[in-house]
Image: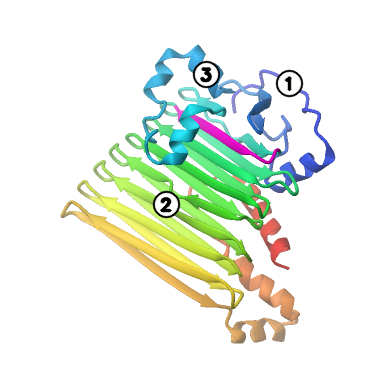
Amino acid sequence: MPKRVSKSRKPKLDSEVKEKLKSVGIEMTPETRSATFLLIDQDVKTISSFYKGVEILSIKDALEKYEWLQDYFWRAVSKDQDEYTREVEADYNGYFIRALPNAKIEFPVEACLYLRSPKKQKVHNLIIAEENSELNVISGCTSHPGVAGMHLGITEYYVKKNAKLTFTMIHSWEHKIEVRPRSAAVIEDNGIFISNYILMNPVKLVQMYPTAYLEGRNAKAVFSSIIVALENSIVDSGSRAVLKGENSSAEILSRTISKGGIVYAKGHIIGEAPNTKGHLECRGLMLSEKGVIHAIPELEAKYPNVDLSHEAAIGKIAEEEIFYLMSRGLSRDEATAAIIRGFMDVDIKGLPEYLKKEIDKAIEMVEKELF
C-alpha cells in the first residue's frame, strides 16, 4: 500500500445527506478510503487524496492541467451517441481518477454523485488505471428525499497493460428520478476490468448499457449486477463486451428481482478475434404478480475460433425450498430471506477481500428494502 500523503476533514453535511451517502456505501473517511470525491448537483463539494499513487481531480481541472487528456475524453463514448450524451457534452462536471504506473491501491477510491435539486445532473467522469497498477473505485449515486429529476452520467474507463480496475456502482435513488448512464471501457494487453452494479431503492427509470472493448491480448472483463425493481420502477439494464484482442475473455453475470417493477436484463458478447471466450448468465426471480422480467441474452461471433455461451432463467421461489428451511427451524420470512440472499450471492472472481465486504453490506441493504 502506498504511503499516506495527506489528511482531510469531512465536509459539513446535514443529517439527511449523511444518511443517503451511507446508503450507497460512502463513508468520507481517510481510514478506509484512498481518496474521496463528492459532487452535489453540479458543484464539487470535496476532493481528497490520502495515498501516493492516486490522483483525483474534478474533470474540468484535469482537462486544464493535462493537455494529453483530450486524447481520452469522448474516445470510449461518442458525444453523438444519443440526445443525452449531446446534452452532457454541452454542460457537465464530474471526476478524474488516475492510478499512477505500478501503484497498487487496496483501499477504494470513493466518488459520490448526489442529486439534491429538482433538475438535471450532468456528469462526465474519466478513470485511468496506468500500466501495472491496481485501482478499486466505489461510486455511490443517490438523491435527496422527495426530489424529482434526472441524472445523466458519462463514464470512460481506460485499463492499460497489466493493470486492473474494479469499479463498483451502487444506486439508491428516489422514485421520481430518471437515470441514464452512458459508459464504456477500453482494456489493453493483460488488463482486467471488473464492473459491479447494485440497484437497491425504487426509481422511476434506469436505462444503461455499458460496453467493454477488450482491445489487448489476454484482456479480461467481468460484469456483474444485482438489481431489485420495486413497484413502478423500470430498469432497462445490460452489459456488452466486444472481444477484439486475441485470447481476450468476458463474463456477464446478472441477478434480477422484480417485486412489482419491470426489468429488461440484457447481455451481449461479440467475438471478433481468435481464441476469445465469453459467457453470459442471466437469472431472474419474480416476487410479485405485478412485475415483469425480460431476459435478453445475445451472442455474436465474427471469427470462427471463438467460444461463446449463455444461460438464462426466470422463476419464483419454490414452496418446497421454503418448507425445507422452515422444517429446520426458520420462520417463513426468514426462509424466504435466506433463499433471496443465496440468489443474490454472485461469486465475483478477482475481488479484493475488502471490496467483497462492501458489496455484502450493500446486499444487506437490499434485503432490508424487501422485508
Mark 2 or mark 1, which has the lower sequence index? 1
Q: Which residue is mark 2?
A: 239
Q: Which residues are magenta?
A: 117-129
Q: x and y percent of residue 301 in the render? A: 22, 55
The nearer-to-camera label among 3 and 1 is 3
Secondary structure state at the residue bearing disc 1: loop
Q: Which residue is mark 1?
A: 7
Residue 280 sits above or below residue 6 on the image: below
Q: Is residue 336 left or right of residue 285?
A: right
Q: Which image quadrant is residue 336 in?
A: bottom right
Q: Which residue is mark 3?
A: 62
Q: How is the image coloured?
A: rainbow
- Asked whether 121 falls inside the magenta stretch, the response is yes
Mark 3 or mark 1, which has the lower sequence index? 1
> Residue flagged by tag 2: what amino acid is it?
Ser
> Residue flagged by tag 1: what amino acid is it?
Lys
Q: Residues within 10 Å of mark 1 (few under 14, many from 20)?
A: few
Q: Determine the residue positioned at 67% across, 39% down.
A: 115
The quarter of the picture where the C terminus appears is bottom right
The quarter of the picture where the N terminus appears is top right
Q: Is residue 305 left or right of residue 43?
A: left
Q: How far apart are labels 2 and 1 at the CA level?
A: 37 Å
Q: x and y percent of residue 48 in the render? A: 67, 23
The nearer-to-camera label among 2 and 1 is 2
Q: Is residue 177 left or right of residue 153?
A: right
> Residue flagged by tag 3: what amino acid is it?
Ala
Secondary structure state at the residue bearing disc 3: helix
Q: Main secondary structure of the magenta part?
A: strand
Secondary structure state at the residue bearing disc 2: strand
